[in-house]
Image (cartoon, rainbow, N blue to C red):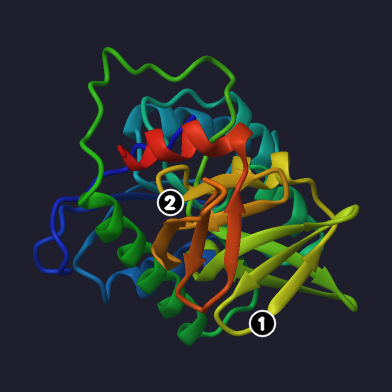
């Protein structure tokens, strides 16, 4: 299910208010987020909850654009809330947790970001910056859905594209923004995620990783290659009538016959 969040302008002053809720059983944690949010005029805090069951009611009553969510809650944990709450559009989910143990599972639920308590103000500011950038980039390509026509199936997970990919390495979890991914290449039982700065190895299948990506920008052109169209430079046709994609970094990939039709249909060529 695609992300339906929509905002119509590109500056904080012009952005529509972002309906925000905080779900955390610690009052001091909720207060800190509230105080930090007060510095940003784009966010409208419409509610708080401290228990799992209360959180479900809050989500369904407010239909928020953004949720700051703790995982360890009385009654139901944060993941159960994401499964049980019914929404008409997909909010951005910011996990706020005192432990790293939930990080990988959080991104199975397409969390947009993961704040590890205690976090610095600068880390929170970066999250806010990423949220605004995400909403602004979406505003040029999406329209707000008709709520009556696009009901979310009951008990469906929250879905989120264009977010972060967790990479576990040497006891640490590193997060890669999908906007920074140029292309992804299959490598046996692993995939190589190539960004502007470096290459990351992840034990994942091509079919599963593409489900985590923004389908308007990422497309599979070969069983072993997924490209980000933002980094595509040109398409050429060889003497053998094969099509090849040249990326802005100079890499060239063949478009396989099995993916050619879908690729050109997507590009409206």
Instruction: Work out whether 265 lies above or below 117.
Output: above
Q: Earlier in the sequence, mark 2 or mark 1?
A: 1
Which sits in the foreground, 125 or 246? Answer: 246
Residue 175 falls left or right of residue 1? right
Q: Quadrant of the C terminus?
A: top left
Q: What numbered label is drawn on residue 217?
A: 2
Q: Quadrant of residue 113?
A: bottom right
- Which secondary structure, mark 2? loop
Residue 1 or 53: which is nearer the viewer? 1
Can you tell which quarter of the image residue 258 is in?
top right
Q: Position of residue 184 (x, y in %)?
A: 65, 60
x and y percent of residue 167 in the render?
A: 75, 67
Eyeballing the image, is 249 above or below 6? below
Q: Give 103 or 214, whichever is nearer the viewer.
A: 214
Query: Residue drawn 50% across and 15% down?
Result: 153
> What x and y, as percent, mark residue 214?
47, 47
Q: Helix, strand, or loop for circle 1?
A: loop
Q: Is residue 6 left or right of residue 193?
A: left
Marks counted in the figure total: 2
Quadrant of the image occupied by residue 3: top left
Q: Nearer the viewer, residue 30 or 130?
A: 130
Mark number, residue 35: none
Residue 266 showing in the rendered view: yes
Residue 52 location (% of width, % of height): 61, 36
* Residue at (17, 65) in percent of width and height: 10
Spatial CA span between label 2 and label 1: 20 Å
Q: Image check: 203 left or right of 167?
A: right
Task: Report the residue that reaches farthest toward the left.
Answer: 14
Kindly identify the residue that appears in the image at 27 percent across and 76 percent down: 39
Compared across the picture, whether 1 is left or right of 221 comes to left
Q: Label 1 belongs to which residue?
A: 198
Q: Are marks 2 and 1 in contact (CB under 8 Å)?
A: no
């Amino acid at each position: 299910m695609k992300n339906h969040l929509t905002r119509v302008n590109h500056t904080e002053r012009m952005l529509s208010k972002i309906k925000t809720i905080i779900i955390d059983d610690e009052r001091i944690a909720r207060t800190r987020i509230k105080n930090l949010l007060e510095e940003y005029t784009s966010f409208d805090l419409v509610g708080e909850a401290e228990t799992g069951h209360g959180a479900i009611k809050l989500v369904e009553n407010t239909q928020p654009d953004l949720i700051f969510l703790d995982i360890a809650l009385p009654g139901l944990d944060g993941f159960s809330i994401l499964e049980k709450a019914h929404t008409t559009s997909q909010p951005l989910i910011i996990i706020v947790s005192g432990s790293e143990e939930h990080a990988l599972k959080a991104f199975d639920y397409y969390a947009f970001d993961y704040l590890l308590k205690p976090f610095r103000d600068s880390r929170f500011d970066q999250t806010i910056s990423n949220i605004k950038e995400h909403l602004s980039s979406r505003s040029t390509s999406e329209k707000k859905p008709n709520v009556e026509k696009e009901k979310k199936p009951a008990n469906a997970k929250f879905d989120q594209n264009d977010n972060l990919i967790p990479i576990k390495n040497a006891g640490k979890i590193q997060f890669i923004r999908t906007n920074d991914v140029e292309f992804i290449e299959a490598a046996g039982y692993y995939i190589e995620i190539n960004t502007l700065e470096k290459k990351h190895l992840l034990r994942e299948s091509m079919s599963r990783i593409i489900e985590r990506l923004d389908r308007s920008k990422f497309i599979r052109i070969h069983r072993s290659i997924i490209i980000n169209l933002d980094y595509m430079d040109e398409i050429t046709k060889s003497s053998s009538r094969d099509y090849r994609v040249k990326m802005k970094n100079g890499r060239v990939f063949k478009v396989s016959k099995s993916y050619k039709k879908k690729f050109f249909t997507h590009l409206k060529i």
